[in-house]
Image (cartoon, helix red, strand yellow):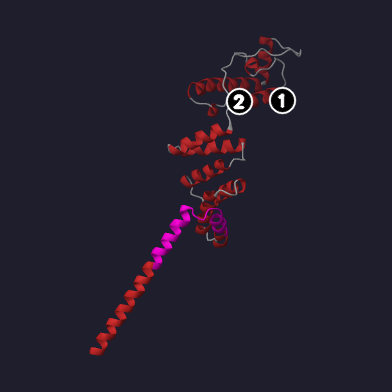
Amino acid sequence: MNPFEILELLPGASMEEIKAAYHRLAKQWHPDRFSGDQKAAAEDRFRLLSESFNALKDPDKRRAFEDQFGKQTTASAAPEPKRTAIPERTADDWFGEAKDSLTHGDLERAMGLIQYAIRLDAGKPPFHVLMADIIEKTTGNRRAMIRSLETAAKLEPKNVDTQLRLADLFRAEGMQARAERLLQSARALAPHHKYFKAEAKAAAAEAKATAAASGLKDRIQALWGKVAKKG
């Protein structure tokens, strides 16, 4: 094993250069970025990178490898190691995998993947909505869900579903004023949304039940009055 070649360095590289090369390549070849056959290839590559870095961290071993492979101080390029061609993955790829992991109940993996997707691109509202979904399934921390959904709402202020979900969370946390403001905004954007239709239906049913109870009370009182007169 030539650790300098694996780290794409020339023998005689400084410790700072070795560290920088290791961190760059470890990020590029981290197994969590891949799946299937590509993941196996990445795991092998990542293992070699770790072994090479650990070997070169030891000054005595580093000198031995320099003697073995020939210390070079020229600016010639290091030989390019053979590698498996793997396409660069995007934040959307990580988001898709996080969504699939949530669907299959792998919550820990889903959380790690969506966090990575957000680090790559924090400007996409669905990423933050999915984060709220995962939090709901894991810790159920309403404040953390609110933070994620508030970010999504700022990025996409006309998304009614996000506003309504936030309003329900605010209500659950006792923040009625904030909930009402969101409901007013959502109603202005989509007055015929199924949320408001369900709300109106529930209110009508409640009013009907109240009226029925009031009518029953009146009938009982009238009947009681008749009984009292006869007595």
Of 209 and 87, the residue lying toward us: 209
Of 123 and 117, the residue lying toward us: 123
Residue 213 place in picture, x, y as percent? 35, 72
Question: Which numbered circle lies on residue 158?
Answer: none
Mark 2: give few (<14), some (14-19) or many (20+) Cα within 10 Å.
Answer: some
The answer to whether one can see residue 165 in this image is yes
Residue 76 drawn in magenta: no
Q: Quadrant of the N terminus?
A: top right
Judge depth for marks 2 and 1 and give the one in front.
2
Residue beneath the point at 56% across and 40% down: 127
Q: Is residue 33 above or below residue 139?
A: above
SS of the residue at dot 1? helix
Quadrant housing residue 222: bottom left
Quadrant housing residue 199: bottom left
Outermost front residue: 192
Q: Amino acid at mark 2?
A: Gln
Residue 185 place in picture, x, y as percent? 57, 56
SS of the residue at dot 2? helix
Mark 2 → mark 1, Cα distance in angstroms: 18 Å
Work out whether mark 2 precedes mark 1 in sequence or the reverse, and give the earlier one: 1
Please state the extent of the stretch shown in magenta in the rendering.
Answer: 181-207
The residue that disc 2 covers is 28
Q: Amino acid at mark 1?
A: Glu
Residue beneath the point at 48% across and 49% down: 140
Taking the image as shown, residue 69 lies to the left or right of residue 221, namely right
Q: Is residue 56 above or below residue 195?
A: above
Residue 9 place in picture, x, y as percent? 68, 17
Q: Quadrant of the C terminus?
A: bottom left
The residue that disc 1 covers is 16
Residue beneath the point at 49% across and 43% down: 134
